[in-house]
Image: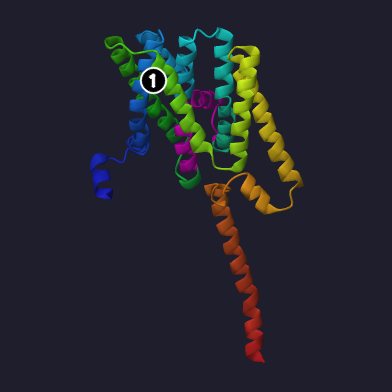
Amino acid sequence: MEQKAHQFNPGNQRWLQVLGISMPLCLSYLPIGVACGILLHAAGMNFVLTFLISILVFSGGAQFILASLLVSDAPISSIFMTLFFLELRYALLGSSLSKYFRSSTQGFVLLFSASMNDENYAVNYLKFATDKKWTPRDALLVEHYSLISWAGGNLLGGLIGSAVTIDLEIVDFALTALFIYMIVMQMRSHLSLIICLTSAVLALFFLTLTKSTLGLIIATLIASLIGFAIENWARKHSKDPWVLKKLFRPAITRHTVEDRQLINEQAKQEQEAAAAEAAPLSQEDEEK
């Protein structure tokens, strides 16, 4: 394997090494990007707008929602608010990477933040946590490689969409399938299931009450606040760790890679301290 990698990159150029790391992500973006480009074209966007959306938004979920809202003739205010709250999670994701960018300039951080999404965040966080040689410039390369792949898929989808006729009803189906998949992948705790069911009930209620997509935003905010309140109350008042384990997430996902490394180092230090304390006792026993 090392010999093949050396043949592919004989000069050990860093940008090629990072490209090899991000290649699985880039390849996975192509088919989804093509589908997104087709749907955006079916929603009324031309080739140029599809390209601009893929660069400026760079979010599969947001672009699928945008296509669905455009098809349903949703008002601009509802589109803006929906995309704003959907993308608000990146503030939390970015904060977890901030410790790795302390020496970077504000311009670099702004450029990095503009091209971050869920998938390249996962790649970069794992590399930062496990590879001491991973730098912010490497992380930015991962984002740019994935952005090029996504934008290329969107452009190809726009060209295909202009050549074939797409039934607009497929937009709603694609969006529903996408978010069902996202919900299933996030069902890692009982609390997630409780909030999922709560948000579904609230969404139906507020959609009926407001008769617009604004009801979804209201339901999302209320469900998020309920989830935060439950988690905060349980952590403050529950003295049984079993309750926290069952309510929130499995034990295997409670620690990051860095947390587990720190735990292993602390355990090693405790073992060394115990061995050092036992050594003088054994010498005293031999003297006696």
160 vs 230: above or below = above
Instruction: From the top left corner, tell me how far across and down residue 13 is, in percent.
Output: 32, 37
Within 10 Å of disc 1 (Cα), the crowding (few <14, some 14-19, many 20+) is many
Instruction: From the top left corner, tell me how far across and down residue 73 is, in percent.
Output: 50, 7
Q: Is residue 171 visible to the viewer in this orientation of the structure?
A: yes
Q: Is residue 9 left or right of residue 116?
A: left
Q: Is residue 26 left or right of residue 118?
A: left
Range of the magenta residues? 101-128
Q: Quadrant of residue 165?
A: top left
Amino acid type for the residue under numbered disc 1: Cys
Q: Main secondary structure of the magenta part?
A: helix
Look at 40% across and 8% down and name the residue there: 45
* Color encoding of the figure: rainbow
Q: Nearer the viewer, residue 107 or 257?
A: 257
Look at 62% across and 89% down and name the residue there: 286
Residue 264 lies in the magenta stretch? no
Q: Quadrant of residue 227?
A: top right
> Could you tell me how many numbered marks the image carries?
1
Quadrant occupied by the C terminus: bottom right
Look at 56% across and 33% down and name the residue there: 93
Q: Is residue 40 left or right of residue 164?
A: right
Q: Is residue 117 visible to the viewer in this orientation of the structure?
A: no
193 vs 286: above or below = above
In the rendered image, which residue does mark 1 sit on? 36
Instruction: From the top left corner, tell me how far across and down residue 109 is, in percent.
Output: 53, 27
Instruction: From the top left corner, tell me how far across and down residue 267 is, in percent.
Output: 59, 62
